[in-house]
Image (cartoon, coloured by chain):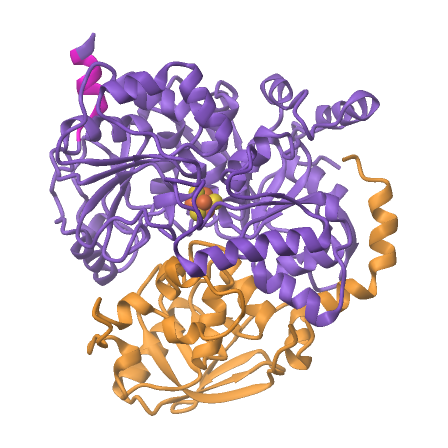
Chain colours: A orange, B purple
Amino acid sequence: MAYDKFNILTSTAVPLPIENVDTDQLIPARFLKATERVGFGDNLFRDWRYNPDNTPKKDFVLNDSTYSGKILVGGKNFGSGSSREHAAWAVYDYGFRCVVSSFFADIFKGNCLNIGVLPVQVSPEFSEKIFAAIFADPKTELEVNLPNQTITLLSTGEKETFEINSYKKNNMLNGFDDIDYLQSIKGEIEEFAVNLPL
Amino acid sequence: MSKTLFDKVWDTHVVRKIEGGPDVLFIDRHLIHEVTSPVAFLGLKTRGIKVLYPKRTFATADHNTPTLNQHLPVADPLSANQLHMLEENSNEYGISYWGLGHQKNGIVHVVGPEYGITQPGATIVCGDSHTSTHGAFGAIAFGIGTSEVEMVLATQCIMQPKPKKMRINVNGKLGKSVTPKDVALFIISQLTTSGATGYFVEYAGDVFENMTMEGRMTVCNLSIEMGARGGMIAPDETTINYVKGREFSPKGEAWDKALAYYKTLKTDADAVFDKELTFDGATIEPMITYGTNPGMGMGISHDIPDAAHVEGGAATYAKSLGYMGFSEGQSMIGKQVDFVFVGSCTNGRIEDFRAFTSLIKGKHKADNVTAWLVPGSHIVEAQIKEEGLLDILTEAGFELRQPGCSACLAMNDDKVPAGKYAVSTSNRNFEGRQGPGSRTMLASPLVAAAAAVTGVVTDPRTLIEELA
Ligand code: SF4
């Protein structure tokens, strides 16, 4: 599915300084029963966000109007667990375009890149700085610059560069997806398949 | 140049390398199920694309399915709709479909190997992270997201950067009551849930060489829980004997050709890994988890560690123990158990039921325990009956349910209620994984059996001594 182009994103951010946030927290399995990609944002962090009687849990950050923005800043090993792309859809559908962490689980990171959410991996030190800045001032803005591969704390000007391979970067900048590419080399794939051992 | 097993299989399947980007990897076998495929099919429809090689994709229904009364219509309308969509999509695109009630239906990672879909040296993907299971055969197998499911349907390829390589060696003789599950939980407890992120793991050493295919599948299944994309074990006689003659295994000339390929599938003596770890199998105990990720495990006779002795932040650790209702320094032995779940693609194979039955034989299910025994497939179910295990289970007060993922992810009715404790042979103890508010302790089928008959967390070795 084609998605929005990503270039430079300047936004306040929502802090979630918990480690090992797993995909079952991002979207619990019981909300995986849809057959279309709609409405997952409502159930993002469902069990951290709502009590069993569906009233909001006041102390959870998504229910705290102090914090808002298009960037989610998570703790180390963000997105571990299952391959459910629904976790990334939930993040996107809620309104986030970028997730920042000092470490991402592999499949989640790949899924984000495939649907137009930019995962930005920063050093543990910079991650600490970002959390501290947001907690000190929830209006703190971050600038995520994909062309330059930088993330900047606008309040202090401190910045870090982040990694992304040039192919995926180009996709994100242009809103392309892998299927477009793969379709374009279909002939080559079919030729290749003839000589496989299995 | 010397190559690892992983290099050999990966390189054989690279259609094209993209400068500064991922490899285009050809996928031999694609497994799909009802939960992660509907949006992929929707994508195909929107784009107006066909499935390129329908014979390379296999569909089974497992995540949502009930484990009782499978002959009746599925009660939950959302689940029923997903199951129906899988059937419709499979029929429309000419994909073999093993739905509920089909004799070949079962958990995707259990039926794949049983029918010979899983082959050494193959590339196998599925929209489920425990696809790593199939690595037991020396295949490169890993979980993918729904966008990638769509790519595989459309082009039989995905685009992935080649991961780094890690080898984990475990040698020595395993102790009494120490099963493949314990070996895996031990490794994860040493590496943490992110210790192998970015790597593809090869398991080597006599502990794995001596394992059955079922045991190897349990180990490879859990590779994802240390963050690895997948894990694999070089194929040997055990592997080839398992694969030979299965329904989808190559036959005749094709078998000879395949066999010649299988024989090449081992790491060259001087091949280099990005990381190599070695453990002594004799030091591994029956394991149990005490926290909310699979890395929070320990030998069952140990005490829950202090925050100071675990990696990561103290706040996250405290949150996790708080959720479980446990404290630092406590022993796990004697802890309350309300539910016991034996099943899943981790431990839902015949060997797991043999192990469970060996311990409960002649004993009785504890009254306070609800036990869900869920075979991974109809083949496993039939074996349980044929081998007389069902009689032993029935005599001890246990029931056998019908195949499916069940309480592994609790998408059907098999949910552990809030606040209740489950000893589970599945793979994840995340908050709410087995139902909102559920508290999961991961363990082997033997530890599950010990809990099921005593009603509390019990070291299986003490019961086996009793028997002897
Ligand atoms: S048993 Fe659990 S881990 Fe395995 S395929 Fe089913 S849901 Fe996934």
| In the displayed structure image, the side of residue B53 where residue B294 appears, left or right | left
Task: Inspect the magenta stretch and tell me whether residue B464 lies in it.
Answer: yes
Q: Nearer the viewer, residue B130 or B310?
A: B130
**From which residue to which does the magenta span run?**
B458-466
| In the displayed structure image, the side of residue A21 where residue B254 appears, left or right | right
Quadrant in the picture for the N terminus of chain B: top right
B404 relative to B206, above or below: below
| In the displayed structure image, the side of residue B356 where residue B126 appears, left or right | right
Rendered location of residue B142, percent (x, y): 57, 47
Question: What residue is rendered at 16% in x and 56% in y?
Answer: B322
Q: Nearer the viewer, residue B63 or B128?
A: B63
The single residue placed furthest to the top in the displayed view is B468
Main SS type for the magenta part?
A: helix
Q: Residue B244: in sight, yes or no?
A: yes
Quadrant in the picture for the C terminus of chain B: top left
Q: Nearer the viewer, residue A101 or A33?
A: A33
Rendered location of residue B35, percent (x, y): 51, 56
B100 relative to A124, above or below: above
Rendered location of residue B349, percent (x, y): 44, 28
